[in-house]
Image: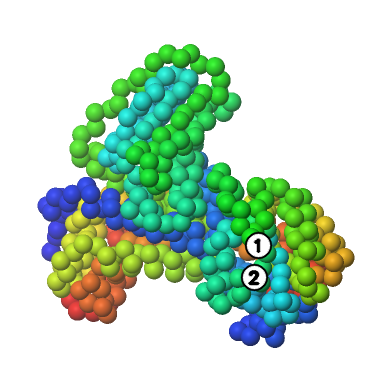
Amino acid sequence: VSEAVLGSGPRTDWPEANAIVLVVTDGASYREAIVKIAQAALSKAPAGVFVTANRPSHVLRQTFAKAQIPSDAFTYVDCISSLTGIMPPAEEGIVHVESPTMLEKIALRAERVLRSLPHQRKFLMLDSLSTLCVYNGMPAVTEMTHNLVTRLRTVGAGAAFVLVEKQADPELADAVRPLCDRTVRF
Amino acid sequence: MSEAGAEATPSRAGPRLTLLELTARLMQRAFEELGEGSILGTMPAYLERFGRAHSTRLAAQGLPVQASFGAVSALAPMNQISTVTATAYTLPIAHRDRAVKRLHDCEFLAAFEGQDEFVRTMICMLHEATYQGSVNALVPKAEDGYDVTVRSRILFGDDHCDFDVRSRVPRPREPDTGGAQPDTPPEELEASQHHFYAYMVASFVDYLSALLPPARVAAIVQDVGEEVGRKLDLRPDDVMATLRRVMRAAGRTFTHDATTIRVQQCPQAPGILDATADQDEDLARAARASACGLCCATLQGAARQSDPDAQVVRERALTLGSKECLFRLVRGAS
């Protein structure tokens, strides 16, 4: 497992399309990190699944549109938009999961969407392990990540798991790092 | 020269609106910086604690609260806060087993009414969490407490916000008057208002400090304070006169010379100290420094209405153990 810093040229820094990457940020550059990771991953694969537990998918779409990331680059598995109790309207390219506490359902939906993408090179981006940890605790999130990594390797897809250091159990990074091919610090 | 805050008879609306604006901007930045998922996972619990702590404090100060008797009685601390913040309310249902508190005004309407539906829903959820914490603060056993649900929302175009408080255990459907609300003298009401809003602002700074690196919190505090200071309704003349006007509006007692302002009494300081009282000493000092940094940044923003190059630094703070707050104008016209 190698560790690197995501620099100003992430397209060249990012590993191959099927690598499983843990992206660790201290939270100070979180928003910038999300955009850069998305751009970097999309430089290696044409499309991906974005599992979001932190920003509603419509907010992410706006953010990515400003960064000139194509709107069809991601299919979203959104487990935060329903959390306020108001069910969001059905929208193409977005699969809603009722709550970030439904880890198994999130993993199943993500895998299903990933398998449905008509590309050979594809990836999953998860924002973020630390947010899921807030709702589920560290052991459950570590277990889900382990299962998800196994499924991703079966499909041959890459992944970027985002972890905001100060918002998570300090042991979470230690538990997830060995599952990943590379750790990138942002 | 000395200048007492009382001489300028500041209106209650001035500092209230400024502190509300600071709180609203901090909340907006928290949404942006942390993400809605993190906020919804952490802030409701934080605000429940905030509601509990405030109720406990009011009861300790002598507010009569018979929370176990009924839903209206359990609402007494929040009703007192509504009185302190001059927020009109009625109680269309006032029984022991159920009460509906109707707020006729939303303090965050101006800051959030044009915002995304998700953000507005979050604001209402966070308000609900504060009520939830407050009504259960003084009930000995949690299972004998109450559940709060927001039924209507001004932020979504309703005429009022209804907080429905229902007992978790059978309580008779009998009227609950909630006990007598204290007849608070205006000067005490004003002090309580300073305390409450300062407590609220400091709590948000404290919350951010728990989740973001210190340098990031400092940057947010500086941005937010300056932004609000720049928008204060002042009649800017020279920088020091502008700063004195802000000090008077905030109700502070201070002395000044050509480049410094020394605050001997700050009505916001007790709220900041109380909001951070339960923290580990290092965390408390950091949160107090950031909360007072917000004050300094607001002053700098205000000063820049008079002089775009003005720079204000805080050299001492009452909340950090000094006998005075010392602000110095280190750059710009005086």
Q: Give the labeled residue for mark 2.
A: A72
Query: Which residue sits at x=80%, y=64%?
Result: A115
Q: Viewed as shown, does residue B241 lie left or right of A10?
A: left
Give the amino acid at mark 1. Gly
Q: Which residue, as the protein is rendered here, is positioned at the far right?
A: A154
* Chain holding disc 2: A
Query: Which residue sits at x=35%, y=38%?
Result: B160
Give the amino acid at mark 2. Asp
* Chain holding disc 1: A
Tell me if mark 2 has few (under 14), some (14-19) or many (20+) residues whose alpha carbon lies within 10 angstroms of its own: few
- State the SS at label 2: loop
Q: Give the labeled residue for mark 1.
A: A93
In space, the residues marked 1 and 2 are separated at their CA atoms by: 8 Å
Is B92 or B203 nearer to us in this picture? B92
Tell me where residue B205 appears, x and y as whole percent. Answer: 44, 56
Label 1 in the same subunit as label 2:
yes
Circle 1/circle 2 CB separation < 8 Å: yes
Tell me where residue B113 appears, x and y as whole percent. Answer: 37, 53
Tell me if residue B264 can be seen: yes
The image shows residue B97, relative to residue B110, as above or below, that is above
Query: Which residue sits at x=54%, y=17%?
Result: B170
The image shows residue A38, relative to residue B138, as above or below, that is below
**Residue A149 lies in quadrant:** bottom right
Residue A149 is tagged as none
Among the two numbered marks 1 and 2 on one chain, the one whose residue lies closer to the N terminus: 2
Query: Which residue sits at x=61%, y=57%?
Result: A91
In the picture, which quadrant includes the N terminus of chain A? bottom right
Is A20 or B318 nearer to us in this picture? A20
Tell me if mark 1 has few (under 14), some (14-19) or many (20+) residues whose alpha carbon lies within 10 angstroms of its own: some
